[in-house]
Amino acid sequence: MGNFDQHYEAGKKYAVIAAGIAAFLALEWGATGTETILAAVVAGIYGIVASLIPDIDHQDSRPRRTAGKYASIGVIISVFALPTLSPEFVRGLGQFAHVFGASGDTLTIGSGVLLVSGIAVLFLGGDTFDSILTHRGFTHSLPFAFITGLISYFSIGIVGQTFQPIAFLDGEMGVIIAFAAAGGVIVHLVVDQEL
């Protein structure tokens, strides 16, 4: 049953190992010198973050508070940015609202649905999250480590589209990142003596 500092220290040690393995595999798979360094850095970051993630289910944990802050910022940005960046999505929300009797411009109605949904998530999201998860429940399991690896594999492709220098990590190289993240969760479980 480790505290944040113990998980962080173990995560740092694991991140160094994950970075070394990532660098070796990247070189084996034909990456350039720069790509090898980037693969090592990204694997280390994913590994250390994943070693802290399982405690997101505890109300007073640092990962939970941090995730809550960034999720709130993400919701607020989405409410204001989606009508401009993805008007088709917002119109789709408006068309869905038309099924329930709303009338008017689909973009306007969709923006209203988005605003109300965003407010609901901001005010009810944490309580809903607490009622779904219990501390040392699902997030402290091997299936969660597997899911974290999968999410990491797919997220690195999305991040690579935004930040071109790591786009090479999409596909086969993304497996390195997936294993680094899954390993980070497993390190957390070992520190908690749950494995």
Image: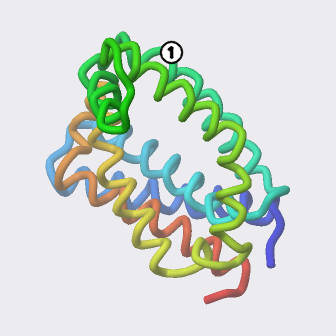
Visible residue check, residue 14: yes
Residue 148 vs 146, above or below: the answer is: above
Question: Residue 75: x, y in percent?
Answer: 56, 30
Question: Residue 188: x, y in percent?
Answer: 64, 71
Pick the front one: 138 or 84: 84
- As drawn, the residue found furthest toward the left would be 30
Could you tell me which residue is drawn at 71 percent across and 86 percent down? 193
Q: In the picture, which quadrant includes the C terminus?
A: bottom right
Q: In this view, does 31 lie to the left or right of 119?
A: left
- Look at label 1 and name its amino acid: Phe
Q: In this view, does 86 lie to the left or right of 70?
A: left
Question: Residue 169: x, y in percent?
Answer: 26, 44
Could you tell me which residue is drawn at 34 percent across and 14 percent down? 104
From the image, tell me which residue sits under label 1.
Answer: 80
- As drawn, the residue found furthest toward the front would be 101
What's the coloring here?
rainbow
Pick the front one: 131 or 25: 131
Visible residue check, residue 78: no
Q: Residues within 10 Å of mark 1 (few under 14, many from 20)?
A: some
Residue 72 vs 19, above or below: the answer is: above
Could you tell me which residue is drawn at 45 percent across and 53 percent down? 19
Q: In which quarter of the image is residue 53?
A: bottom right
Pick the front one: 109 or 30: 109
Could you tell me which residue is drawn at 73 percent across and 79 percent down? 192
